[in-house]
Image (cartoon, rainbow, N blue to C red):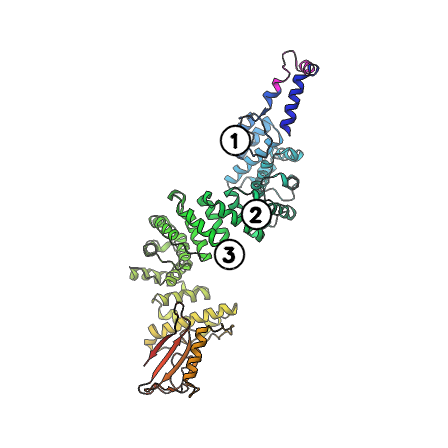
Amino acid sequence: MTTRLLGRWARLLSRCPQASASAAHLQGPTAQPAQPLRSQVQIRSAVRPLCLGHGRAQEEEPNVTFKRTKLDVLVEKATSPQEVLQAWEDLGGSPNQAASCLSQLSRLVVGKGGADSADVLQDPRCVDLLETVNSQVSVIWNGTLVSLLRSLSNLGLTPSATVLRSLQTEALWRLRRLTYRQLSYLVDWASSRHSQGQGDEALTAAVLKQLELRWTELSDPRTVSTLMGRAAQLSPFLMDKLEDKALELAEKFSAEDIRKVALALASQGRRAVPLLRALSYHLHQKPSSELKTPLLLDIAFAYGKLNFHQTQVFQRMAAELLPRLPEMSSTDVTRCSKSLAFLKWLHLPLFEGFAQHFQSNSEKYSTLQLCNLLMSFAKLNFQPSNREEFYRRVHEALEGSWQGLEPFLLADVVWSLCVLQQAKPEFIAALTDPDFQTKLSGGSPVRTENYRLKLLHIAASGQLESLGALGVHPTIHLPTIQVKAPSLTSLQSGLHTALQSLTSSCTTALRTDVNTVYGWTIDAELVVDSENKPISLEKLVAPHLPGGGGSEQLPQGAHSLMCWAGIPGLGVPSFWLQE
């Protein structure tokens, strides 16, 4: 609109002799009627617009660009807030230049840690900048307006400040004129303010509504990743559309965009398999220079949380991380091992490297990090090649700190040591103590039952390995939580029916759904004599039962038969025969 008006004004001045003469009379004898106007304002000029760090001119901005002034140059080259303020005091400028000065001030203050923000805001020159913006907020360009909101928030301006409220109101009025990319930056800023309890509900709701209505305009990969990073604020409809757009634009994603999208999906628990496969393919094609260590760790975390397996990506990840192990911190090692353990993916050279990293830097590992490393190894049943030296350092690190661990964490660590066959008798004795077990009874019923199962495993390990040789038989006092029993599968029902028909002559010869002291359930159990006829189980010794069963031993030639019908991957029941 401005371009057409200026062009029409120039043509009228050139066609009207009286107007030209009047203009020449007002400007002096050497003035030219139309040339000065075109030298001040250039239509579609190649001269750089006044944007000061906001990137190229936005397409929606007017096609009028101004020549760079001395203020623009000084502000761009400024290395401290005082230089920006002094340049504004000496030269002054338009509201758009004032907004650019404030943006540059914000970058310089934040770059120094924000310690000078209060002094900068109280400076009279900064106050003049804010007043200039507030007095003519309607002439500030769209891109400058959106970036100025973030800049003023970073400067520490309070939400009740007049200029900030004016900018928010102006942004609300202009929503339909903002591009989709500007809307995404605006909702990103509004969401961050909302998380701090300082957001404008009306502005946030209006921006989200515009994003939903105009989702077809989305064509920028960076905008997709930015929006998905705020998934908690978005509606399910918009998230579905963003996933579709991400799948469409996945080829253009940078490695950082892939990281943002993967973390957004993980934070919402959205296991979009087609999108994750596309992201995995394009991530695998990226050069090593883009695959930084923090990025790979975030990808491993996201895939672990979503339980998404992609062998080629994991192999590439291991190949990239192996040479970087000496540079990785203890936090990096424990994060990566924990994520891969959730995925049940074991890469022997990489985990050998993790074990060696601990041996070389054991003093840098906190107790919590060591616990996470042990739990990761236990989930994968991984034993280091140099296990003696590794476990020696583990026990040295736990020597003075294991008793101070939180009860649930201590149960996890001792369970892991039992799996790794490294639990000391004092560890098991501490967990099978009734006073300790009462500390695990809090929480949800499912969690209590889960830790009761772990305690059963720990007690069985102690009885069969370390404490059994000493004549100590640990017991579990944690009460059984009545949880909803899972429905029987067709295989389990068929097994029960067949065994019941076999033992119909002796009703006490069959047990079903037997809970053992070892933490697992037997689908069916029966005993047959030397002639393969069922016999009663009531008086027979049963060390696998919590009460130990009866007092009589198995008769000569009798066999105990235990059956499991629910083993994954098997289409027939599994039997265990005991003499």
Q: Nearer the viewer, residue 404 or 256?
A: 256
Mark-to-mark CA distance, 2 and 3? 21 Å
Q: Nearer the viewer, residue 311 or 413?
A: 311
Tell whether label 3 touches label 1 (CB within 8 Å).
Answer: no
Task: Give the amino acid at mark 1.
Answer: Glu
Q: Is residue 317 visible?
A: yes
Mark-to-mark CA distance, 1 and 2? 27 Å
Query: Label 2, on which residue?
Result: 192
Disc nearer the start of the sequence (2/3): 2
Q: Is residue 229 visible?
A: no
Query: Label 1, on which residue?
Result: 76
Pick out the residue farthest to the top. 29
Residue 407 in the magenta stretch? The answer is: no
Crowdedness near tag 1: few (<14), some (14–19) or many (≥20) residues, C-alpha within 10 Å: some
> Which x, y percent locates residue 378?
37, 63
> Which x, y percent locates residue 283?
42, 47
Eyeballing the image, is 528 above or below 15? below
Label disc, if present, on residue 269 of the rendered structure: 3
Q: Nearer the viewer, residue 5 or 354?
A: 5
Label disc, if present, on residue 132 of the rendered structure: none
Q: Quadrant of the N terminus?
A: top right
Q: Helix, strand, or loop for circle 3?
A: loop
Mark-to-mark CA distance, 1 and 3? 43 Å
Q: Quadrant of the C terminus?
A: bottom left
Which stretch did the figure color magenta? 20-36
The image quadrant that residue 547 belongs to is: bottom left
Q: Helix, strand, or loop for circle 1?
A: helix
Task: Give the amino acid at mark 3.
Answer: Gly
